[in-house]
Amino acid sequence: MKPEEEVRKTRYQTYALVWVTLIILTGITLSAAGRELGGWTVLIALVIAGTKSGLVLNYFMHLRSERLTVFKVIIPLVLAVFLVFILLTFSDLAFRGGVK
Amino acid sequence: MDETTAFALEGQRDATGARLGMWLFILSEILLFGGLFILYSAYRYKNPVDFHHASRELDVILGTLNTIILLTSSLSMAASIAAIQRSQRKLSMVLLIATMALGLFFLLNKGFEWGAKMEHGIYPNAPTLLARAKGEILFFGLYYVMTGLHGLHVLVGVCVLLVMLILLSKGKVRSTHFTPLENSGLYWHLVDIIWIFLYPLFYLIS
């Protein structure tokens, strides 16, 4: 654990670069949505949204420079719980048969 | 005092503990919105065509503009924290005011967007909306609940940042003690992340 005054400082340029990347990714999402890609559209949109979130989490939210292991563990843990919810919901939906 | 139990020297504060607490709150927020995202996915899976038609009626330009606004506000938020770490108090305050202004601009756009929808008779329980296909009613219901809950988070975020601005001006948040600002920033970025997912799922269904 580190005293807060010793926290590693991120350079302004790094933040600016992350912002530029986020804007470019938004542009890619927008242009991909305009094309006929069928079922891929949702997947592409979610992958890009995930990438953008990763950038925000690691750089803006400083997850990258957190020293304690617990910070690295709790997020995958929550995402795993979330995935279980999704799987249970969709396994229910998929096997309902005629009931809507 | 060994390394693992070291506290911030000033006033025996535990900056890491405070951040961890904030992260736990943020993760509970992710699951709150996560539940709504699962609801959205289930209904979209059952009504793909209706969702497609309803999504066409949303204003993509306004949605994209709001995405850029929130991403930019995240940049100014992160820069505001970087500034106070470097003892640049005035710069930090200016960047914080910019973040709040962008947040309010986002809400203003959202207000125009909702207003336009309501003028066209699209709001919860509206007779014109209830006459539509089931999937479209569900889409607009989710649209109002999810963007509404998100908008509420933006509003709360702006209020929290206002408190931070006052603390900054009084010198209670400073280069040796900026954890409150850091934690407020974490909340602000969370709101940004939620929007990153809302944007393609509501505005860009092709």
Image: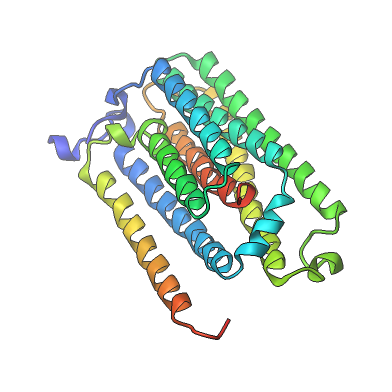
- In the image, residue B168 above or below residue B182: above
Horizontal side of residue A15 vs B93, given as left or right: left
Q: Quadrant of residue B59?
A: top right
Return the residue nearer the eye: A24 or B4: A24
Return the residue nearer the eye: A22 or B100: A22
Q: Residue furthest bottom?
A: A98
- In the image, residue B151 above or below residue A99: above
Q: Where's residue B52, x and y in %?
A: 65, 57
Q: How is the image coloured?
A: rainbow
Horizontal side of residue A69 vs B146, given as left or right: left
Horizontal side of residue B192 vs B133, given as left or right: left
Return the residue nearer the eye: A2 or B103: B103
Q: Where's residue B96, x and y in %?
A: 56, 25
- In the image, residue B38 above or below residue B9: below
Q: Residue furthest left?
A: B2
The structure residue drawn at horizontal position 67% and vertical position 37%, both measured from the top left corner, is B106
The structure residue drawn at horizontal position 74% and vertical position 51%, both measured from the top left corner, is B57
The structure residue drawn at horizontal position 64% and vertical position 43%, both measured from the top left corner, is B155
Q: Quadrant of residue B48?
A: bottom right
The structure residue drawn at horizontal position 71% and vertical position 57%, both measured from the top left corner, is B54
Instruction: Tell me if residue A2 can be seen.
Output: yes
- In the image, residue B18 above or below residue B147: above
Horizontal side of residue A45 vs B69, given as left or right: left
Q: Where's residue B181, x and y in %?
A: 47, 32
Question: Quarter holding the N terminus of chain B?
Answer: top left
Q: Quadrant of residue A98?
A: bottom right
Instruction: Tell me if residue B173 can be seen.
Output: no
Count up the numbered dots.
0
Q: Where's residue A11, x and y in %?
A: 37, 17
